[in-house]
Amino acid sequence: MAKENGESSDGSWKKHVDDIKKIFDFKEVLGTGAFSEVVMAREKATGKMVAIKCIPKKALKGKETSIENEIAVLRKIKHENIVALEDIYESSNHLYLIMQLVSGGELFDRIVEKGFYTEMDASRLIRQVLDAVNYLHSMGIVHRDLKPENLLYFSPHDDSKIMISDFGLSKMEGTGGVMATACGTPGYVAPEVLAQKPYSKAVDCWSIGVIAYILLCGYPPFYDENDSKLFEQILKADYEFDAPYWDDISDSAKDFISCLMEKDPEKRFICDQALQHPWIAGDTALCKNIHESVSRQMRKNFAKSKWRVRLRFSQLGTTVWFLQILQLHLKSPASYLKLRHNWVFQQDNEPKHASKLV
C-alpha cells in the first residue's frame, strides 16, 4: 500500500500523498500553462519555501515518456546554477514536482531594470551558463532548449547567480552521442537541427552563442519580416555584427560569439573551449556602460507578447506554417514527412509531436 510522505511500497521515487496541502501551505501562483501550474509554497515541517509544479494526471496521458525523461534528468543533476528538483509527490489525481524556488526574475527583465550594464556583466553571466552546461554535458545530458526565458536569477540581490531551468526537452545521450529528433525554440536552435541532421551536445553551444549575441546588443541575430527568409538565415548561419549597435563591443566578444555560432558543429567550440576563451577567462571584456543601447533594443525586440508569438510554436496554425516553411529547405518529400512526424514543439514546457497536432 502507498505510504503518505514516504516512498511507495513498490520502491518508486514518487512519494504518495492523499492531500499535498497537508505537507505544504500553497501561496501565490507563479505561472500557469496548458498542462500544469507552478505554485509558491511553504513546507509546513521546515518553513522552507519551494516552487511546486502541479500536473494533473489526465494531462499526462500521451506525455508519460516526456515527464519521466524530465524527472530522470533532474534527479541525476546537482549544480549551483541549475534549478534543483527536491522531491516528487503523487496523489490520485496529480503529480507534484517540488522544485528549488528562484525569486530573482527572468534574465532580460533584470538587465532592462539595471542602470549600469557592461560586457563584463554579460561575460560573467555567460560563464555561469557555460559552467552549468559543461557539467550537464559531462553527465551525458543535452538541454536542447537553452533560451533567455529559461535563465532565471536565484534572488533579487544585485550579485545573484543565474539558474538554468526547464528540462522538458533535455535528453540523455546514448552511447553514440548523436540525436535526431528536431526540437527546441527556433530562434535559438542550431542549423543542423533545422536541417534535420543528426546532432550532438554542440546544439547547446550554438544556443549559448545566440544568447551571448543578444546580451551584447539587445536584438536577435536572425530576424526577417519574411518568415521563409528568417529560417533561411538560420540554416545558413547568416548573421552580422551590425553598426552602430556593435561599434562599442570588443573584437574579443565578437570572436567568442563566432566560435559558438559556427555553422559546422565539428568546428564549433564546446563548453570547455568557450570557458577558456579570453572573453570569458581573460580580461578582454570591456567595462563600458552599454545599458542604454541594449535595454532599448531589448524593450523593442523582446516584449513578452511579441516574443512568445514569434519564437514559441504554441499555436496549431503556427505549427503547420513552420512545417511548410521547412519544406522549402528539405531536399526530398521523404525527409519532410520524417520531420513532420518527429518535430517536437515547445508549448508551456510540455513537448508535443507534430503528428498529434496536424
Image (spheres, rainbow, N blue to C red):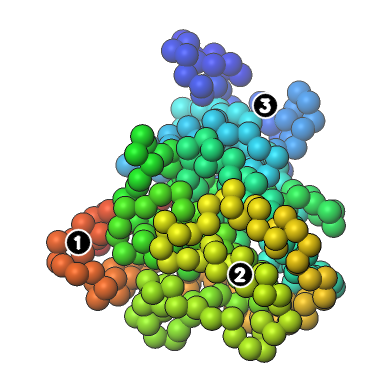
Disc 3, SS? loop
Residue for badge 1: 335
Pick the residue in front: 129 or 224.
129
Pick the residue in front: 231 or 354.
231
Is residue 175 visible in this depiction of the protein? yes
Residue located at (43% from left, 73% from top): 237
Residue 93 placement (x, y as % from top left): 46, 32
Residue for badge 3: 23
Residue 315 placement (x, y as % from top left): 39, 66
Pick the residue in front: 317 or 27.
317
Please, which residue is most extreme toward the bottom here? 244
Residue 107 occupies quadrant: bottom right
Residue 354 in the image: above or below residue 217: above
Residue located at (46% from left, 53% from top): 202
- Looking at numbered disc 3 in the image, what kind of residue is underneath it? Ile
Q: Disc 3 vs disc 2: which is toward the camera? A: 2
Residue 238 placement (x, y as % from top left): 45, 78
Q: CA distance from mark 3 to mark 1?
A: 50 Å
Quadrant in the picture for the C terminus: bottom left
Residue for badge 2: 255
Residue 299 in the image: above or below residue 149: below
Residue 113 placement (x, y as % from top left): 79, 70
Q: Residues within 10 Å of mark 2 (few under 14, many from 20)?
A: some
First in sequence: mark 2 vs mark 1: 2
- Looking at numbered disc 2 in the image, what kind of residue is underneath it? Asp
Q: Disc 2 vs disc 1: which is toward the camera? A: 2
Pick the residue in front: 262 or 159.
262
First in sequence: mark 3 vs mark 1: 3
Residue located at (47% from left, 73% from top): 310
Is residue 61 visible in this depiction of the protein? no
